[in-house]
Amino acid sequence: MTPKATPKGEIFLERRAPGRPHEGKVLAAIQPHSDDMPIYSSGTIAKLIDEGYTAYLIQVTNDEKCGPTPSFGETILANERDVEALAKVMGFKQTFYLGYRNHLMDEAPAVEIRARMLFLIRALKVDTVFTFNPWGHGEENPDHWITAQAVEAACWMAGNPKDYPEHLAAGVMPYSVREKYYWTARPGQPYNRVVDISDYIEQRIDANRVNQAQGPAGSQGSRLRARLAAQGQYLPELGNDDDTADREYIRLFCCTAARELGQQYGVQYAEPFYHVGPAGSVYGFATGEEVQAYLDTHVRPLK
Ligand SMILES: [Zn+2]
């Protein structure tokens, strides 16, 4: 049984939208490691690109600790090639490599990481971000929360013209992120939004398959098929060639939570997120729209 994420409050089921309602909007997937975005949100991002979003990929670390050989150099290169393949298969417009050292992001000043995120949000005019939950319990990988906390603060600060005013002089104007889809990455982390990805499961499989250097998917299927064959065995689901074996392995073993969550919400496959909508006012105060609505019905002419 796959460990479960935890529903929090009222759950919104985001379905496929007809047409291209997000035309003109920009999203950024901000991942510390090459396998993060594919594991947690490749179905949803494929859906949002199909619905009109322009998407950018921001690769935060150099992934030097997760790869196929003991060599740091080969590991970095293998991951970089995987990220390039990932961007292509998903349809990202551009990839930015920030190059922080894997598992050692706290070597870098937090303020520098935040400032680089802030600049990218402004320059790319990012409306929506995907990243880890900055306050996600059970998180063991420091790159995850360091990235997420820098992103969360940058989303808000990027809209303030007094932060880094030299950007404005250079023509890079303030811009506020309106929506955050935080990944539900560990058992027990909360979600309040479930996205129906049933029509995008093949893209989710493509995205996980290009992760050859690390991650739970890649070529595990063809390797398992070869190992079974060496023992005089076969698993019918893995088919008769490596391509089918890789894809069907991912469908069987790397979409388990997506399948179970989907069944829970009446769709075939789904991905969970802790979604944070457009910032309103400070808690407990009326929003600008609420103040205006009150004025519209209560203001009287001067005598
Ligand atoms: Zn990661």
Image: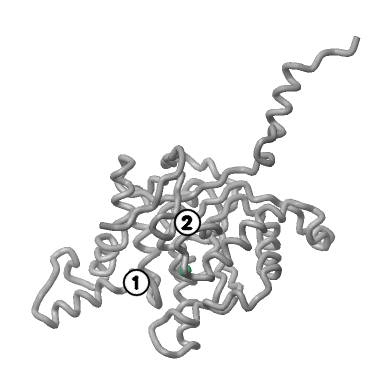
Using the image as rendered, state which of residue 138 and residue 149 is in the foreground.
138
> Does residue 301 lie above or below 270 as drawn?
above
> Does residue 4 lie above or below 210 as drawn?
above
All told, the count of numbered labels is 2
**Corner quadrant of residue 93:** bottom right
Residue 17, labelled with which disc? none
Farthest top residue?
Answer: 303
Count residues near mark 1 (Cα–Cα under 10 Å), then give few for <14, some for 14-19, many for 20+: many
Farthest bottom residue?
Answer: 71
x and y percentages locating residue 287 in the rendered image: 69, 34
Residue 18 appears anywhere in the view? no
Q: Amino acid at mark 1?
A: Gly
Cα separation, mark 2 vs mark 1, equals 21 Å
Residue 35 appears anywhere in the view? yes
**Corner quadrant of residue 295:** top right
Residue 183, labelled with which disc? 2
Give the residue drawn at x 24%, y 74%: 222
Using the image as rendered, state which of residue 204 and residue 253 is in the foreground.
253
Give the residue drawn at x 12%, y 72%: 234
Residue 218, labelled with which disc? 1
| Circle 2 SS class | strand
x and y percentages locating residue 60 in the rendered image: 57, 70
Give the residue drawn at x 38%, y 52%: 5
* Mark 2 or 1, nearer chain start: 2
Using the image as rendered, state which of residue 248 and residue 63 is in the foreground.
63
Q: Nearer the viewer, mark 2 or mark 1?
A: 2
Q: Amino acid at mark 2?
A: Trp
Give the residue drawn at x 27%, y 69%: 246
- The quadrant of the picture occupied by the N terminus is bottom left
**Corner quadrant of residue 95:** bottom right
- The quadrant of the picture occupied by the C terminus is top right
Q: Going by the image, does 185 lie left or right of 28?
A: left
